[in-house]
Image: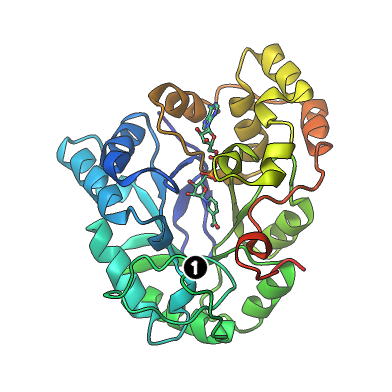
């Protein structure tokens, strides 16, 4: 299956518009789920230290390569630096651990996961440290960014970028970056279209990856009251009508709305039918009117906000 891609300006490398998310895929199923996603045509895998399953993602990649389904060069692997490793001396350590866990000798894209710096937790104490004891340990972003740039110089990372950054923080990074951020990775779905931030980042030459594309779905299972009180996107009437008109599912319409706006998507599912369905988004086109209708669904409703679960209001 031919997957369309975006060019990353700093390196000239291509990033697939369609990827597969690995957050909350349970360790015991991850290797198989990843293998099946690659079999279904996904070429980008969105990983992170924080997801606690990079060893198993690596096993899935290894199986896919050994079966001859794909070569390493045909895959695009993203991972993320966790909040407890922002000091310059911890960045290479955290990256080396991710690389070893994934069983790779380079990764395509390494992101600062959050603009939040927490106290260092040694690997032997707890890995991944998650939000740990929540003790903040501020590190200027320029220090972390310089260490990320060194990873590019080492040849083990092709591009670097940021996740959950606002426009102001992006301006800050752009003011000193010697290696420019290639990607901004943010929450994007019909209830939070983030259009201003997307336009701004695109105007500065960054590509966008939207996460949690199905909005509340991912957060209902975490017990989030905000998500539980929202109308599920899969039941939203305007989306259901557009989906019926195209003989597609609501999930496919949401993903299509994003890729049509050059926003890369990374849906997550462990169900093979949904995995295949979510990949079939390049065979139809939404009209301008349909795009306008979906753009008009912005509330905005943010579901992944550390103010709620870590008492750190990065969007205040
Ligand atoms: P998602 O929007 O991909 O939704 C997942 C939920 O939707 C699951 O409950 C799944 O069962 C369901 N689903 C998937 N396909 C479906 C379909 N076709 N029909 C009906 N239901 C379907 O949620 P997500 O996992 O939060 O986001 C995707 C990925 O984004 C993550 O796995 C992770 O890789 C990344 N992410 C990054 C950050 C970050 O801070 N950088 C935060 C959240 C997620």
Q: Image check: 25 left or right of 263? A: left
Rendering coords of residue 203 (x, y %): 72, 61
Secondary structure under the numbered disc 1 in the rendered image: loop
Placement of 11 over or under 210, stated as above or below:
below
Placement of 270 over or under 72, stated as above or below:
above
Placement of 70 over or under 246, stated as above or below:
below
Quarter occupied by residue 200:
bottom right
- Residue at 38% across, 41% down: 43
- Residue at 39% across, 65% down: 158
Q: Determine the residue located farthest toward the left in the rendered image.
A: 66
Q: Nearer the viewer, residue 159 or 88?
A: 88
Rendering coords of residue 171 (x, y %): 70, 75
Q: Image check: 80 left or right of 170? A: left
Rendering coords of residue 227 (x, y %): 67, 42
Name the residue carrying label 1.
Answer: 131
How packed mark 1 is, by other alpha carbons closer than 10 Å (few <14, some 14-19, many 20 or more), is: some
- Residue at 15% across, 41% down: 66
Quarter occupied by residue 295:
top right
Rendering coords of residue 79 (x, y %): 41, 60
**The C terminus: image quadrant:** bottom right
Specify whether residue 73 is in view: yes
**The N terminus: image quadrant:** top left
Q: Nearer the viewer, residue 297 or 167?
A: 297
- Residue at 60% across, 28% down: 251
């Amino acid at each position: 299956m031919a997957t369309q891609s975006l060019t990353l300006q700093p390196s000239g490398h291509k990033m697939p518009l369609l990827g597969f998310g690995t957050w909350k895929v349970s360790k015991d199923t991850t290797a198989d789920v990843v293998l099946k996603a690659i079999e279904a045509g996904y070429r980008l895998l969105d990983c992170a230290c924080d997801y606690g399953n990079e060893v198993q993602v690596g096993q899935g990649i290894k199986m896919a390569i050994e079966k001859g389904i794909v070569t390493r060069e045909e895959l695009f692997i993203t991972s993320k630096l966790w909040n407890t490793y922002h000091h310059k001396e911890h960045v290479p350590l955290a990256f080396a651990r991710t690389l070893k866990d994934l069983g790779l000798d380079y990764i395509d894209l390494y992101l600062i996961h959050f603009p939040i710096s927490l106290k260092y937790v040694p690997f032997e104490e707890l890995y991944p440290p998650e939000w740990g004891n929540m003790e903040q340990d501020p590190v200027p972003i320029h220090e972390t960014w310089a260490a990320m740039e060194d990873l590019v110089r080492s040849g083990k990372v092709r591009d670097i970028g940021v996740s959950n950054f606002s426009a102001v923080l992006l301006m800050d990074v752009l003011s000193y970056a010697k290696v420019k951020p290639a990607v901004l990775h943010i929450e994007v779905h019909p209830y939070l279209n983030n259009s201003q931030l997307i336009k701004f980042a695109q105007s500065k030459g960054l590509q966008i990856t939207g996460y949690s594309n199905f909005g509340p779905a991912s957060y209902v299972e975490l017990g989030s009251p905000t998500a539980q009180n929202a109308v599920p996107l899969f039941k939203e009437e305007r989306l259901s009508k557009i989906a019926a008109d195209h003989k597609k599912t609501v999930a496919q319409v949401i993903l299509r709305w994003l890729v049509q706006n050059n926003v890369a998507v990374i849906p997550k599912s462990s169900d093979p039918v949904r995995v295949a369905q979510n990949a079939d988004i390049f065979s139809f086109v939404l009209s301008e009117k349909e795009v306008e209708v979906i753009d008009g669904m912005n509330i905005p409703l943010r579901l992944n906000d550390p103010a709620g679960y870590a008492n750190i209001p990065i969007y205040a």
